[in-house]
Amino acid sequence: MAIAFLNDINLSNNEIQNVIIQRLATDPTGVEGKIIYNNGSNTIKYYNGTSWIELDGLGGIAGSGTVGTIPIFTTNTTTLGNSDLVVTGTGSSSYLEIGYPLVTVKSLYVQADLKDTNDQTGTAGQLLSSLGSGNGIDWIDAPVSYTKWVLTGDSGTQDILDGDTVLITGGIGLMTQVTATDKLTITPAFNEYSTGTPTSTSAIIFGIDGDLENQEVRSAEAQEFTLDMFGAPAANIFFNSKKITSLADPTVAQDAATKAYVDSSVEGGLTVKGGFIASTGAITTGGNLTSGALRVAIAVGDYYVVTGAGNFFGNAATPLTVGDSVLVQTAAVAGASTEADFAIIQSDTDVATATTIGIGNVNLDTQSNSVGLSVGYSTGTALIGLDIKAGFPALPQAVGGADRMIIWDGTSGNQGNYYVEADDLKTFFQQGDSFAGTSSSGTTHVFTHNLGSSDVIVQLYELGEGINTGNTVYADVTRTNTNVVTVTTAASANIRCLIQKVG
């Protein structure tokens, strides 16, 4: 059974591969442009709108004239395109010319020998050249080409012609070396300068005196150059694990800091002093933090951790538990410290209540069952879960049985928890996501599905009578908008359209 298409197919310049043209024993009713393969004559035929035209078995077009041969042109009268073919001369001296328009030859391969106007083939290396003014062409020797070199210097200029030999030697401050037949190396040789020769291996050559009458190399010892004489670095500086010594103390934010400066800057920072019992003030390492004349001297940054619970400085408004800590923020001499000298740092927060934010407490809400939640709390751990049976006691119908879902009806006057059967959901969604319609005639078929989306799957099958009845067919399908699909067929068709919304 062939697949039926109700409209043209556009392959967008792609190939049809491994295809066989329809084979028929007799010619069918013709449709202009139709192609068949006739089994009787073993030929391909096409219909030109009036009759079937046969292509011969050799691949040519059947009809008058010679097939598969080079056409014969009548000289001086036959036109090939817009160019006349003209025979000049007679007998063995005749040749063919192409008249207007002129022919441009982009690539020419000649197997025979080329000859000039005098019928000469020339010698190896010669070139064909036009003599000008219609005098034909002649063989000439190839021109000799060379590159002209000119040496310049204080003593003047000198042309270097083919065959000349040039000797290049190093002058003062330059050294030459030939390392190959075609390679010349020139390197500086500062020690050849007559004056200003460096006397130290750490010296730096930094220029030549600009005095025209007394030019000479100048040098300086490396230690005479200081870092501030050079430009700012453009990348990180690698010190190879070495120190920077004799550095001044910094004065602005981006200055490098010395060790002494850093050490002095961290004085008074956080200093862990140990634990203490809050109820008595006793420090585990000795001494007392809060009791009368026994109080130790304290410095800014001293840090104590509570190891025994109690009221700080006996103040019931400042209860401390194990794990809390205190930090000295104001220094005091021995026996003079007060609670105000300390900052209190609590490590935990008391258990929360319904009105106080805290840690580890969850209050049971008497209305929690109305949202289907089961809430539990034990030793600092809260358990929250979904409890459908206990959470929906006021359903209009009893909860039970398979294939049911609990839903909330928010309609005013009818709010409450309900359940629906799975089959009801299936029917509801099918009604809202699908459409079927019929168009019994015409070439433009408009189907209004009202699904509110262009993301729809469209399938067509043919109605009526005939060999394609009930078969899936193909045509142009356009999603005109989110509620309409338009199907176009080349001829009048009786089709059924099935549309399914996706997503």
Image: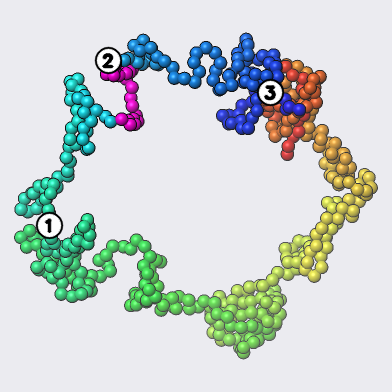
On the image, the x and y values in percent for residue 31 come to: 66, 15
For this view, does 416 lie left or right of residue 320?
Answer: right
> How many residues crowd around disc 1 within 10 Å: few (fewer than 14), some, or many (20 or more)?
few
On the image, the x and y values in percent for residue 35 come to: 63, 20
**Residue lying at 71% horizontally and 26% vertically, measured from the top left:** 474
* Residue 124, disc: none
* Residue 89, disc: 2
**Residue lying at 19% horizontally and 25% vertically, measured from the top left:** 118
Q: Indicate the secondary structure of the residue bearing disc 2.
A: loop
Q: Is residue 67 visible?
A: yes
Q: Which is nearer the eye, 475 or 400?
A: 475
Magenta portion: prevailing SS class: loop
Residue furthest to the right in view is: 398
Q: Is residue 99 magenta?
A: yes
**Residue lying at 62% horizontally and 10% vertically, measured from the top left:** 50
Q: Quadrant of residue 48?
A: top right
Q: Which residues are the magenta region?
A: 88-112
**Residue lying at 62% horizontally and 18% vertically, measured from the top left:** 45
Q: Is residue 155 magenta?
A: no
Residue matched to label 3: 23
Residue matched to label 1: 167
Circle nearer the N terminus (3, 1)? 3
Q: Indicate the secondary structure of the residue bearing disc 1.
A: loop
> How many residues crowd around disc 3 within 10 Å: few (fewer than 14), some, or many (20 or more)?
some
Q: Which is nearer the eye, 276 or 243?
A: 243
For marks 3 and 2, give the one nearer the viewer. Answer: 2
Which amino acid, mark 2? Gly
